[in-house]
Image: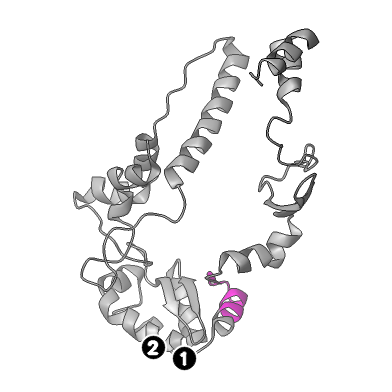
Amino acid sequence: GYDFIIQGMGGFMSITGERDDLPGGGPQKAGVAVSDLMTGMYSAVAILAALAHRDVTGQGQYLDLALFDTMVAMLANMNMNYLVTGKAPGRAGNAHQNIVPYQVFAAADGHVIIAVGNDGQYAKFCEIAGHPELATDPRFAKNADRVRNRAVLVPMLEQIVRARPVAFWTERLEAAGVPCGPINSIAQALADPQIVSRGLRVDLPHPLAGRVPLVGNPIKMSATPPAYDRHPPLLGEHTEEVLRELVGCSEIEIRALREAGTI
């Protein structure tokens, strides 16, 4: 299966992108192959569960995973929105279907994500924004009210956020415990101090290419940390090793395969 097609078939693209009535509206795919990646991750979990079952019962089992299944399962709360209400959620751009404000805003020098998760955070946000009256306005005091009056509140907040740079919002909101963050480019993300300090940038020596930049393993393990001691293999670099150690070929057999042009 093709991830792009699965994103469409699985309903993912029906909730991704701007609404049809807005500029640039229409279904959008994710920037990476999410169903491919997540099916692999679900597979890893399934394998671990099967190994645990084997350790207890001594029985093995067949594991069956599909891209389509994974894509539908990934819809999470969007599935429940439909199953509970009978109404399929549509696209909301970078906004949240059930929480306001919880979206991307244009700041004076870039874009910032402001993800107000509850009414207490909303009051703090309004205070920092210099508009505490928006926290007590009965149209916006509770999240349900803000969702209902999204079309009124969001344009007001857009004007407020646009007046200040990204750093103003991230520094003050983060200090107040209001979730927020910048929208980084890949270059900015890889240069982030946390990414650097946690070893996500790895440079490995390579016999032909000098030092090769790679992305490290995001899993950190105290007893068995990942090791980066092997370069990306050259074409055929381990052919003889595989034939000798895994297949059981003798040196004579390997030499015959090479002389015949098989390897």
Q: Amino acid at mark 2?
A: Gln
Reply above or below: 33 against 259. Answer: below
Residue at point 33%, 78% (across, down) = 140
Reply above or below: 55 against 212. Answer: above
Could you tell me if the residues under marks 1 and 2 are in contact, i.e. CB atoms within 8 Å? yes
For residue 159, which numbered disc appears in the image? 2
For residue 212, which numbered disc appears in the image? none
Residue 102 relative to residue 58: left or right: left
Residue at point 68%, 66% (across, down) = 191
Residue 146 relative to residue 135: left or right: left
Residue at point 68%, 46% (across, down) = 217
Residue 40 place in picture, x, y as percent: 51, 36
Q: Say which element carries label 2.
A: helix
Reply above or below: 67 against 23. Answer: above
Residue 220, by quadrant, is top right
Residue denoted by label 1: 163
Dot 2: few (<14), some (14–19), or many (≥20) neighbours within 10 Å? few
Q: Nearer the viewer, residue 256 or 31?
A: 256
Residue 151 place in picture, x, y as percent: 26, 77
- Would residue 6 be counted in the magenta stretch? no
- Would residue 171 be counted in the magenta stretch? yes
Evaluate whether residue 132 shows in this view: no
Q: Nearer the viewer, residue 82 or 200?
A: 200
Residue 34 place in picture, x, y as percent: 45, 47
Q: Say which element carries label 1.
A: loop
The magenta segment = 170-181
